[in-house]
Structures are given as structure tokens and as C-alpha cells.
Image (cartoon, helix red, strand yellow):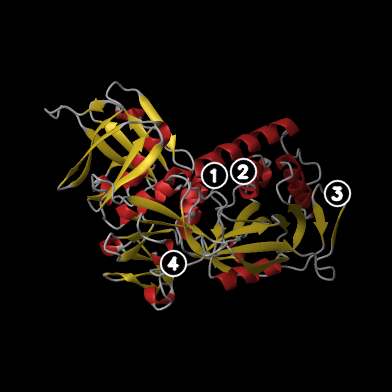
């Protein structure tokens, strides 16, 4: 999906919004015109006008709820300001917060944010154009830039999926190109190969059954058995697989676990990172775990045939994996022919007899399996089964073969109803984030900005002093007021920092 980044830039408009720091205030003293009145929507989905803020001094801040750093600190700073105002100013100072992300920050989202931070002053949102108009009054300008989304943490196995294929030439000379579509059994076998686990499997009318792992075979009385678990990213929990291991799409379910039902299920750990992984909890409550981060000719072979629902017998030995049979066809006893591996040479654009086994081919895009009496010239070039522009309606490519073939639709497209080989446009909001300079203003009774603070690098005690200073200048309190309670530097920093860290952790 494409990503929209909003850069919110604070502009100092020299004619109208000129300001310079002076000694009377800790923040930047301003000489602005009134921002006037405006209407947005608050966290209760009720209309809110700035004129509703009837206090003689109004603090206006800008934030967004998905902000990971500055905004939570500013909110906690303002909470400390609110809580440490001198008693005679408590009814004279109001607070208002305006979102920088109106597309995401709905009234419901704002209410959750307020509850998280323990604040109760109005938090405002509304139609994007209305909110932008408010930004402009406070010298905040928004401009959108479109950039391509990317993921630098894609595993080798995931990165090799698109267009990886196996050309399968039958003994009668007919050929089929199988696209890579690994199943749960593919992932389990690959993990077992990397971790050195022995597997005891059997083929049944219901598909492949895991009968034993590392010599722990399930008993005939079914007092326990090997249960397949899938990790649910949404709930962050391991769940029973609703289908057999052959029907699990390992491109979507990248984390599997095999659990002996007599063991302690709490021993299953949440997977770490995006690299495909398999966990095992044995009957004696010992555990094992491995990632499957590499992509070899073995993975491509097993995944392509599994995805096409063609039975392939790949056996493991001390010399690595070797292919014994395809579709229950194996080499005859007299070895008059046998299955031979071919690799594609990108430079010469031709097939070659592989000089290494399938485990020795790293990052393959195309390999071929054919009888050894098949010449390289007789093997179709890879890509003869690759999706044409007319397929997937020109908005995707086909993954899998046979009954498992389906479109991998481009961003902004999805399967048509009851047709997995068609891609139709869908309306969806693009993902985006917000980058910005965070301004917080102190306004007088005429709604003129008088003091501005930038970002979160300020102390609540300094802010309170400025509110008191403005109140004295405006005659709200007398100059001989006792002023604010002493809030020391270390206390302010500690309180706000700990609150921000705690709330950020909860938010994540």
C-alpha cells in the first residue's frame, strides 16, 4: 500500500505573526492578531466553537493520537500545567487541543486518547478542510507528499515468492509450470530440516498427518496427539488450526507450532520478528524453536508441488534432500531414467544440468525437474505459465497452480466475489503518518496568541509562570499574587518523562 506522509511546518509570517523571545516570558512572546472564532467537533461529536472557551486565558495545543513521541509528552506537560495552576486562576484558564490528523482522529478516537492520558478539556477534529483552516490561523501549514511504501525486513523466503517457479516435465514430455505456494507442511518440513528434527508423517484421506517429532510418537490410544497451532497476529494468541497442515497457506500463516496435547500449553511463546518460524512443545514439556530464513531449491520444490496439490516425495539424508518421486512416479528399479534437477542460467538464458543438489541452490527464481533423458532444450523456458496482462484483470499475478491458483491483487484491488482469479478496485484510505513542529499557544481573552512554545522541550513550571505573567498583565490577578506553587525542574522532568513513557508503552 502506498503511504502518505504529512509534513506540518510552522511558518513564521513576518508581517502578521512576527514574534521574538523576551525576558518577561519563558516562551516566545507574540504580537498576533486574534485568531477569531472557528467551529469544529469535539470528542463527544458535538459542535464546538472557540468562543465556547469563555475563560480570560486559553491554551491551544496541536497533537495527533498516533504520535509516538512529542504529542504524549506535550499532553502530559499540559496536564501538569492544569494541575499546578494557582487556585485563583483555576477558573480563568481554559484548554483546547486540535488534531493534526483529522482523517484518523475521529471523536471516538479522541475520547480514547483523553481517557488514556486522564485529561478532560475539549479535543477537536472535523472535516479536513475545516481543520486545515484552523491550522492556518495558528501559522501551521500542511502539505502532502506521496512516497512508495517499502519493507526492509522482508525475509528471504517472502522476498522470493513473486515469480519463483518450478517447471515440471513429465516422463511423457508434457510440461507444467508451478508457482511457489508453500503450505504448512512445507514450512514444517523446512523447519525440521534446519533444526534437525526427525518427522514421522503419514498420508491419509485427510492429508498429511504428523505422527511424531524427534521420536515422540502419538500413542495408539490417543491419550495425546500432535496439535497444529497458528499464531493470530490480531489477538497475539496461538489458536487451533481450523484446517489440516496441507491446507495452511504458509505465505499468510508464517508462524506455526506443534503442541503435544498432554504438555503445558503456556510454554508456547509469541514469535519474534517477521521471519517464518515453527515451535514445538514436546510431551515432557521441553521445547524447541527455529526460524526458516533461507530460500533454497528445496523450499521452492516442496512449496511449488505442495501448492499445486501434486504429491512429491522429498527425502532427507546425510547428503541433503533428494527427490524420490513426483505424482507417485519414481525412477524404475533398473535406473533406466531418474528425476534430474535443472537450474536456470539468467546470463545465457538457458537451462543447465544442476551441478549441486536442491539444497545447494540459493535464492532460486526458477528450477526444473525432468527425467534425465530430457534435453535442456526440450524444457520450456520459465515464464510460459506466468500471468498475462489480461489475467487478474491486469491488476495482479497468479500464485499457485491447479485448484489452488489465485490472484495476488495489486494495492487497491481485491478478489471479485466468488472469483479468486479476478481483481477489482476497492475504495480504501491510504496509510499515512504525520510529521510536524508542535506548537502550543497561550491566548488572551480576545483570542490573540500572546506566547508560543515549540515542541516538547519546555517545563510545566515555566509554562505556568507565563500564564501567571499574562494574567497579571491583563489584570486578571494582581501583581502581589502569591503566584504558583514551586514545581522544581527535576520533579517536572521526572513526572512528565515517566508518564509519557508509561502511556507510550500502553499505547503500543
**Nearer the viewer's eye, disc 4 or disc 3?**
4
Q: Distance from label 4 to label 3 (Cα)? A: 79 Å
**Nearer the viewer's eye, disc 4 or disc 2?**
4
Residue hosting label 3: 24
The percent position of residue 36, horizontal first and vertical second, equals: 68, 70
Q: Secondary structure at mark 3?
A: loop
Q: Distance from label 4 to label 2 (Cα)? A: 63 Å
Q: Distance from label 1 to label 3 (Cα)? A: 31 Å
Residue hosting label 4: 381
Of residue 208 and residue 462, the one placed in the foreground of this image is: 208
Residue hosting label 1: 117
The first of marks 4 and 3 along the sequence is 3
| Crowdedness near tag 1: few (<14), some (14–19) or many (≥20) residues, C-alpha within 10 Å | some
Q: Distance from label 2 to label 1 (Cα)? A: 7 Å
Q: Quadrant of residue 141?
A: bottom right
Q: Distance from label 1 to label 4 (Cα)? A: 61 Å
Amino acid at each position: 500500500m502506498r503511504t502518505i506522509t504529512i509534513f506540518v511546518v510552522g511558518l513564521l509570517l513576518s508581517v502578521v505573526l512576527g514574534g521574538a523571545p523576551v525576558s518577561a516570558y519563558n516562551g516566545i512572546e507574540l504580537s498576533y492578531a486574534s485568531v477569531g472564532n472557528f467551529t469544529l467537533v469535539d470528542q463527544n461529536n458535538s459542535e464546538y466553537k472557540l468562543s465556547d472557551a469563555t475563560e480570560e486565558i486559553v491554551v491551544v495545543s496541536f497533537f495527533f493520537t498516533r504520535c509516538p513521541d512529542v504529542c504524549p509528552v506535550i499532553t502530559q506537560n499540559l496536564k501538569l500545567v492544569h494541575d499546578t495552576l494557582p487556585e485563583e486562576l483555576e477558573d480563568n484558564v481554559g484548554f483546547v487541543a486540535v488534531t493534526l490528523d483529522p482523517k484518523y482522529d475521529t471523536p471516538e478516537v479522541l475520547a480514547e486518547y483523553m481517557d488514556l492520558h486522564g485529561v478532560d478539556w475539549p479535543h477537536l477534529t472535523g472535516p479536513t478542510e475545516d481543520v486545515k483552516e484552523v491550522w492556518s490561523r495558528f501559522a501551521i501549514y500542511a502539505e502532502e507528499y506521496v512516497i512508495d511504501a517499502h519493507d526492509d525486513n522482508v525475509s528471504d523466503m517472502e522476498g522470493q515468492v513473486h515469480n519463483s517457479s518450478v517447471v515440471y516435465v513429465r516422463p511423457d514430455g508434457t510440461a507444467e509450470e508451478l508457482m511457489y505456494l508453500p503450505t504448512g507442511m512445507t514450512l514444517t518440513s523446512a523447519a525440521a530440516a534446519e533444526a534437525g528434527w526427525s518427522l514421522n508423517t503419514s498420508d491419509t484421506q485427510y492429508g498429511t498427518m504428523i505422527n511424531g517429532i524427534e521420536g515422540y510418537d502419538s500413542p495408539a490410544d490417543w491419550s495425546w496427539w500432535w496439535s497444529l497451532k497458528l499464531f493470530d497476529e490480531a489477538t497475539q494468541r496461538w489458536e487451533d488450526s481450523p484446517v489440516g497442515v496441507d491446507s495452511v497457506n504458509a505465505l499468510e500463516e508464517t508462524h506455526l507450532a506443534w503442541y503435544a496435547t498432554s504438555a503445558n500449553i503456556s510454554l508456547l511463546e509469541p514469535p519474534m520478528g517477521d521471519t517464518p518460524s515453527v515451535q514445538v512443545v514436546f510431551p515432557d514439556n521441553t521445547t524447541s524453536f527455529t526460524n526458516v530464513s533461507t530460500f533454497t531449491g528445496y523450499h521452492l520444490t516442496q512449496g511449488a508441488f505442495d501448492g499445486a496439490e501434486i504429491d512429491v516425495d522429498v527425502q532427507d539424508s546425510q547428503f541433503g534432500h533428494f527427490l524420490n518421486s513426483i505424482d507417485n512416479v519414481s525412477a524404475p528399479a533398473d535406473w533406466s531414467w531418474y528425476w534430474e534437477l535443472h537450474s536456470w542460467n539468467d546470463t545465457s538464458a538457458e537451462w543447465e544440468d544442476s551441478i549441486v543438489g536442491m539444497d545447494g541452490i540459493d535464492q532460486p527464481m526458477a528450477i526444473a525437474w525432468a527425467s534425465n533423458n530430457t534435453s535442456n532444450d526440450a524444457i520450456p523456458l520459465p515464464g510460459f505459465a506466468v500471468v498475462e496482462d489480461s489475467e487478474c484483470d491486469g491488476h495482479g499475478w497468479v500464485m499457485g497452480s491447479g485448484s489452488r491458483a489465485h490472484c495476488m491483487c495489486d494495492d487497491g484491488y481485491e478478489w471479485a466475489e466468488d472469483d479468486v482469479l479476478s481483481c477489482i478496485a476497492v475504495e480504501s484510505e491510504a496509510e499515512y503518518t504525520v510529521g510536524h513542529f508542535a506548537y502550543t499557544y497561550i491566548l488572551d481573552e480576545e483570542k490573540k496568541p500572546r506566547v508560543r512554545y515549540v515542541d516538547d522541550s519546555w517545563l510545566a513550571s515555566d509554562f505556568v509562570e507565563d500564564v501567571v505573567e499574562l494574567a497579571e498583565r491583563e489584570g486578571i490577578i494582581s501583581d502581589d499574587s502569591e503566584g504558583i506553587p514551586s514545581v522544581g525542574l527535576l520533579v517536572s522532568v521526572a513526572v512528565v518523562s515517566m508518564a509519557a513513557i508509561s502511556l507510550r508503552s500502553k499505547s503500543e
